Image (cartoon, rainbow, N blue to C red):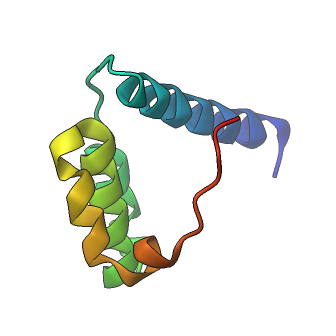
Amino acid sequence: MDTDETWCSVKIVENVLDKLLRNLCGTYMGWTMKPFVDHLKSRLSDDDYSLLSALVAALSEKANLEKLDAFPVWRAAVSLPLE
């Protein structure tokens, strides 16, 4: 991975974490990742695409968080403290 790709990856993660933390702290800021997820669809299995779509929906709207529980891989994930 070259420097530009690394930087882009870091910025994507930084952006997602920023949005997630804002959402968890009670401040909501809308964003859209659906075009990016749709772009990746041909590279993902149906299950992975469904999970990623549900994750994006949950990050976009708090009401969608419970929908993640439909995915065994999500339920099996170990949560880590933010500190």
Q: Quadrant of residue 19?
A: top left
The image shows residue 51, relative to residue 16, as above or below, that is below
The picture places residue 4, in percent across and down from the top left corner, at: 75, 35
- 48 relative to 54 in the view: left or right: right
Q: Residue at x 72, y 42 (%)?
A: 5
Picture quarter with the C terminus:
top right
The picture places residue 59, in percent across and down from the top left corner, at 33, 42
38 or 78, nearer to the observer: 78
Q: How many marks?
A: 0
Q: Quadrant of residue 37?
A: bottom left
Question: Is residue 14 or residue 3 the one in the foreground?
Answer: 14
Decide which of 2, 32 is in the foreground and name it: 32
Horizontal arrangement in the rendering, residue 54 relative to residue 79 (left or right) = left
Query: Residue 30 placed where, x, y %?
Result: 26, 24
Image quadrant of residue 71?
bottom left
At a point 39% along the width and 83% down the height, the residue shown is: 72
The residue shown at (56%, 36%) is 12
Placement of 58 over or under 51, stated as above or below = above
Query: x, y (%) of residue 80?
Result: 64, 53
Left or right of 3? Residue 5 is: left
What residue appears at the point 54 percent right and 71 percent down from the top-left corner? 77
Q: Is residue 5 above or below residue 77?
A: above
